[in-house]
């Protein structure tokens, strides 16, 4: 029997300092939206004898889907932020009305959204930037048997911090690889100090 996941409202950091008029409730509602979506979709899939969405999606695809969903849900609940309408624009969430038509290729007024399975929030980016970065860490149970007894996808950590180009290290690139950057030891410590939610 599938279980509907719920956000633990007592695990939020009441001392967190949030930019852009954000509220802790915005994060709680956005995460719950995603939990409800997965429960509804997985209920339909398993009723037809199909795998859960969590089991179908490869890790990289899952992270991409969750990032897009969280961006849309945070925009829905936020008072001042909206989705960046520029395709692959940066950041994902921008302050309403700052940029023409609410789209910008590379802006500074907003928040970049990332999701990862890596505990602690270390995540690759396409380049070092001065930015507000929000990282959602999640877990997926792909091992419990029978599969119908698997735990629902869960967000275990949320971080939101202001980072600069000096907080990143550039990753080595292979001949066919894409250039990436990751927060270095001090940078990730800085992000972790700005935690929003921890289970």
Image (cartoon, rainbow, N blue to C red):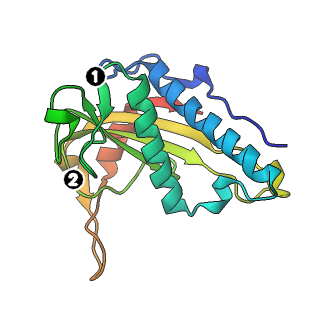
Q: Quadrant of residue 178?
A: bottom left
SS class of the residue under badge 1? loop
Q: Which residue is mark 2?
A: 128
Numbered mark located on residue 20 in the image: 1
Query: In the rendered structure, which disc, 2 or 1, sits on the residue that comes first in sequence?
Result: 1
Whether residue 153 can be seen here: yes
Count of numbered circles on the image: 2
Residue 120 visible at all: no
Side of 64 relative to 149 (left or right): left
At horizontal 82% and vertical 49% (from top left) the residue drawn is 149
Query: Mark 2 falls on what kind of element?
Result: loop
Task: Kindly identify the residue that appears in the image at 27 percent across and 39 percent down.
Answer: 84
Identify the residue at horizontal 69%, vertical 53% (top origin): 141
Residue drawn at (25%, 53%), measured in percent from left and top? 168
Q: Is residue 3 above or below residue 65?
A: above
- Residue sticking out furthest to the bottom: 175
CA gap between label 2 and label 1 equals 22 Å
Q: Is residue 71 above or below residue 116?
A: above
Residue 186: x and y, percent?
30, 46
Q: Position of residue 185 (x, y in %)?
A: 33, 51
10 Å crowding of disc 1: few (<14), some (14-19), many (20+): some
Frontmost of labels 2 and 1 is 1
């Amino acid at each position: 029997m599938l279980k509907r996941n719920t956000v633990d409202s007592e695990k939020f950091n009441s001392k967190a300092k949030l930019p852009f008029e954000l509220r802790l409730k915005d994060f709680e509602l956005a995460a719950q939206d995603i939990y409800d979506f997965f429960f509804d979709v997985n209920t339909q899939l398993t009723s037809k004898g199909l795998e859960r969405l969590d089991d179908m999606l490869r890790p990289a695809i899952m992270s991409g889907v969750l990032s897009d969903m969280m961006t849309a849900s945070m925009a829905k609940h936020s008072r001042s932020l909206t989705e960046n309408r520029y395709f692959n624009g940066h950041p994902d969430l921008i302050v309403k009305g700052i940029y023409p038509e609410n789209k910008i290729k590379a802006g500074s007024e907003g928040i970049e959204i990332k999701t990862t399975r890596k505990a602690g929030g270390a995540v690759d980016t396409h380049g070092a930037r001065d930015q507000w970065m929000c990282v959602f860490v999640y877990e997926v149970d792909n091992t419990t048997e029978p599969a119908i007894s698997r735990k629902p996808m869960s967000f275990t950590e949320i971080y939101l911090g202001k980072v600069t180009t000096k907080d990143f290290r550039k990753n080595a690139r292979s001949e066919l690889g894409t250039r990436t950057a990751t927060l270095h030891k001090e940078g990730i410590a800085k992000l972790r100090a700005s935690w929003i939610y921890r289970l």
